[in-house]
Image (cartoon, rainbow, N blue to C red):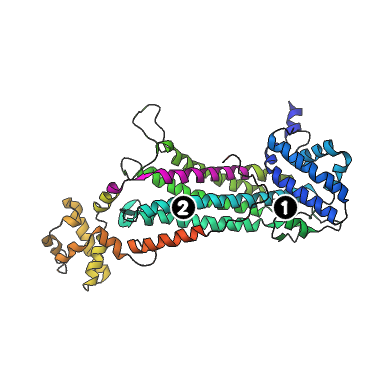
Amino acid sequence: MQSNIYNNYTVSHSFDRRLYTQDIAGSVAHVRMLAAQNIISHSEMNQIVPGLLEVEKEIETGSFLWQDSYEDIHMNIERRLFEKLGDVAGKLHTGRSRNDQIATDMRMYVKDVSSQTISYLISLQFALIDQADKHLQTILPGYTHLQRAQPVLLAHHLLAYVEMLERDLQRMASTYTSANLCPLGSGALAGIPYNIDRQMVARELGFSGITTNSMDAVSDRDFVLNYHYASAVCMTHLSRLAEELILWSSSEFGFVELADIHTTGSSMMPQKRNPDFAEIGRGKTGRVYGNLLSLLTTMKGLPLTYNRDLQEDKEPLFDTVDTLVATLEVFTNMITTCIFNKPAMLQAAEGSNSQATDLADYLVARGLPFREAYHVVVDLTNYCRKTDKLLTALSIEEFLQFSPLFDKSVYSITIQKSIDLRDSTGGTSTATVSNMLQEVRTRTLNTPIPALSNKAETINSAR
């Protein structure tokens, strides 16, 4: 039993094999550079490169035999290359360490998943934008402290999430940039004694440049932390959206109906339609937070340079990628297929005295200082609570009990007028939101998506 534990404790190919496309691409670029620099012969290169591509095909088709005795992806691929080519395969590792090799793989992977995550974020943005376009006239109460506050357009509410996702896009783009320097050529920690051309490798692998300090290059995982952080904030936004869908789909709100595919029944209560997909998305947020904290904890005590602790950077990253992308995909479909209950939303807005602020503004327009007007309306709303009346149901005589500045023009204050008066930039007026909607759609259409590595197949389980 003890022997088996020791044999498997350091083995990582069960999870780092996910990096095979990046690893082989990096090896191919490295070998071509070695030949270009006359460090190995072109004849040797012409054997090694096709051999690597054959190994890649074997991995893709599932015929590749992974062996625990070769603990990681690098040694397994190199072992198979030896089986195919013999001793010439040993030339592959000239001028390279597993330390700068895995750093390169990870940077390529993070670039790829950042780019692909951006695509999924854009898809969710468009789902929200399309729903907003359908609901430019739909009114609901806006909430503060989960209490009905002021009337807003549903389109305005949905576009708030588009703005959150826009910030997520910016963080993902920044993550891509942080990973976009090639560390290959740093060696184990001190550089390489051969006449290598690091810029050539960087160009072939699609990097914008090379790292400048070999010790930092092999031990840096900030770009991985950046992906974790960007994902954690994004999951926070998705969890907030999930919470609103959960609340809004309840009988108490009745604002939205989720498609059957996104709900499940109860094992005991046949009438139930539980918003399980939204709840699971909300729940998965915690594990993404945990993955960020896991790597932060791993990194905090590491001296320069490479330490084997860094093997623990991969599984949390892969889990975060799969969790975030799956959640984005599910939520995109959930938003696309849900049905908003316009009458229920309007009834909630009209039945909540949500135009109280407009009454205070009405008195301000007639010369009363706002703080005094505010207290007049506080007294009015307290009166409404005691008499179980809405502001819209009060007689002019009742209004006059609280201020002589009221006259029958007070009845012109409607939910729709309250909406339309808020026409400042970023406000909820129909005209403002309509303009905002067009601007956001144009911005989203023009969002740049960073380039993927050649043959990038990085988000496997989410596809």
Residue at x-position 74% and y-position 28%: 4
The circle drawn on residue 219 is 1
The answer to whether 371 is drawn above or below residue 172 in the figure is below
Residue 279 lies in quadrant? top left
Q: How many labels does the image show?
A: 2
From the top left corner, tell me how far across and down residue 146 is, in percent.
35, 51
The answer to whether 398 is drawn above or below residue 80 in the figure is below
Residue at x-position 52% and y-position 60%: 446
Q: Mark 2 points at which residue?
A: 126
The answer to whether 167 is drawn above or below residue 25 in the figure is below
What secondary structure prevails in the magenta region? Answer: helix
For badge 1, the amino acid type reads Ser
- Circle nearer the N terminus (2, 1): 2
Nearer to us of marks 2 and 1 is: 2
From the top left corner, tell me how far across and down residue 332 is, in percent.
47, 46
Side (left or right) of 142 relative to 8: left
Judging depth in this view, the residue of 187 and 65 nearest the camera is 65
From the top left corner, tell me how far across and down residue 236 is, in percent.
49, 50
Judging depth in this view, the residue of 260 and 188 nearest the camera is 260
Span highlighted in magenta in the image: 317-344
Residue 139 lies in quadrant? bottom left
Task: Estimate how packed mark 2 is, as few (under 14), some (14 to 19) or many (20 or more) residues with alpha carbons within 10 Å.
Answer: some
Side (left or right) of 141 relative to 45: left
The circle drawn on residue 366 is none
Side (left or right) of 109 relative to 277: right
Badge 1 element = helix
In reply to whether residue 264 is colored magenta, the answer given is: no
Badge 2 element = helix
For badge 2, the amino acid type reads Phe
From the top left corner, tell me how far across and down residue 268 is, in percent.
38, 26
